[in-house]
Image (tube, rainbow, N blue to C red):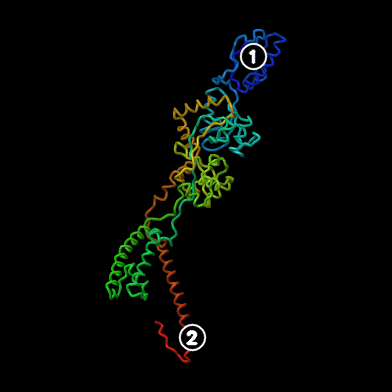
Amino acid sequence: MLLIPTPIDVLLFNIINTYLNETLCLSIVSEQPIDVPIMKSPESEVHQPYYLDRWNTCKEEFEENIYIFPHDMSNLNGKIVKVACFTYKPYVLLDIDPKIESLGRDGTEIRIVNEFCRWVNCTIEIIRDDVHQWGEYYENHTGVGVIGNVLEDRADLGITALYSWYEMYLVLDFSASGIRTAITAVAPSPRLLASWEMPLEPFTWLMWLGLIFTFIYASIALTIARGCSTDKVFLTTLGMMITQSQADAGSTWRIRSITGWLLITGLVLDNAYGGGLASVFTVPKYEQSIDTVQDLVDRRMAWGATHDAWVFSLTLSSEPLVKQLVSQFHVSSADVLQKKSRERSMAFAIERLPAGYFAIGDYITKEAMLDLTVMLEDFYYEQNVVMMRKSSPYTEKISQLIGRLHESGLMLAWETQVALKYLNYKVQLEVALSRSRKDVDTIEPLSFRHIVGVFIIYLIGISASIALFVWELKTKGVSRRMQRVRGGHDVIVDLE
């Protein structure tokens, strides 16, 4: 009896092979033809035997010589394919209103498996684990989440932003890459510089060090020119550096030469400082932004997400910078991350997708993004794959499908469609425009905020002068009393 075989799993090879070996041993005794049945697919008819061919024990061959292990995936006859996933936009969206989506599910990777089952005539059954999300596997070959469901055969396919992780490749099969994604972060936006720093902004710190060196060098030169006299030398030097005129140009050519060069130097520096200060007061100045991985590491700023799968691709790296980056990663619940997004205390991992959109957790709201900025540099990039157990018969067929989707451009089209239909477009715009937001209103009129720093410096100078004056009065008073005691009579002390 012969019927055309239906698609079977490759693991059935070992079962039938063992069965044939046993029947071969029996054929020596019985010398009767032996039927080779299997369990019929799909599962609705699994209890019905399905005959492939008949083994002739006398001739030691199959009667019809049918290839009993065909790898034909063209028609699965409605076979149930279990897909492990969880809700993560825009890859997988579950529990959608049937009025919006008839199947109640959508997403870029959901569309891949939907198209796959439409192609090979199978039925999708969702195996979801929103608690463990991506999950992990253990040394005893058990696991939780999407990875665990596929590893323990609770699911045939695993999707939802699964990257080509080396540890997973050792125990699971990967399909061809479906989506190329880049991992980056949104970090606290740079704030306006404090007003007391504005008077220092026209020059860099290196320039200020040069000015201090020039002041000290000119003071020493003027002291030597005056015959090692330090009388008012620092005040005179400072006055000339800020273009203050001098009552006495000096009695010798040495003093006049130093005075002339200092006045020229002061004129150039004063004009340069004035122009820079006008620019600082007109165009707002911001703190240094966090643009690169090095910036994030240098500031020791924590970054995080809801699962440590975000750093699976980095854990095997031996680079010190990457190791430090991984050590700064923290896993927190969505509620905690949503709270911290308003506190400017950490950065948040996001994905930069190929069509220009972003995969962003729901804990990042539009209000939080007003104070966050996307980084320029990506942490790393990865290739999203569909995971299956080793030697899965679906691997080759899904890889062929993904290749055709790339050729037709459907992957990019699906990303755009899903983003426009389901993602928070205001949040997407805030992320995309976060780096240009502060360039919208760059010119503002002069206000009290701009000159607070000048008044702070003025108050510090006045306070220092008063403190020195009081200290001088006390020291002079003590010196005057000591002179009275020693001379036995009043001594007139010239305070000048």
Give how far across and how far down residue 405 sits, in percent. Answer: 47, 28
Q: Is residue 447 or residue 173 the one in the foreground?
A: 173
Quadrant (top left, top right, bottom left, bottom right) of the N terminus = top right
Report the Cα–Cα distance between label 1 and label 2: 124 Å
Residue 259, quarter of picture: bottom left
- Disc 1 residue type (three-letter): Tyr
Residue 4, quarter of picture: top right
Compared to residue 421, the image places residue 483 above or below, namely below
Q: Nearer the viewer, mark 1 or mark 2?
A: 2
Compared to residue 58, the image places residue 74 above or below, namely below
Crowding at mark 1 (Cα within 10 Å: few <14, some 14-19, many 20+):
some
All told, the count of numbered labels is: 2
Residue 482 marker: 2
Give how far across and how far down residue 181 sits, in percent. Answer: 48, 37
- Disc 2 residue type (three-letter): Met
Q: Is residue 164 or residue 113 the one in the foreground?
A: 164
Q: Which residue is mark 1?
A: 51
Give how far across and how far down residue 247 sits, in percent. Answer: 30, 75
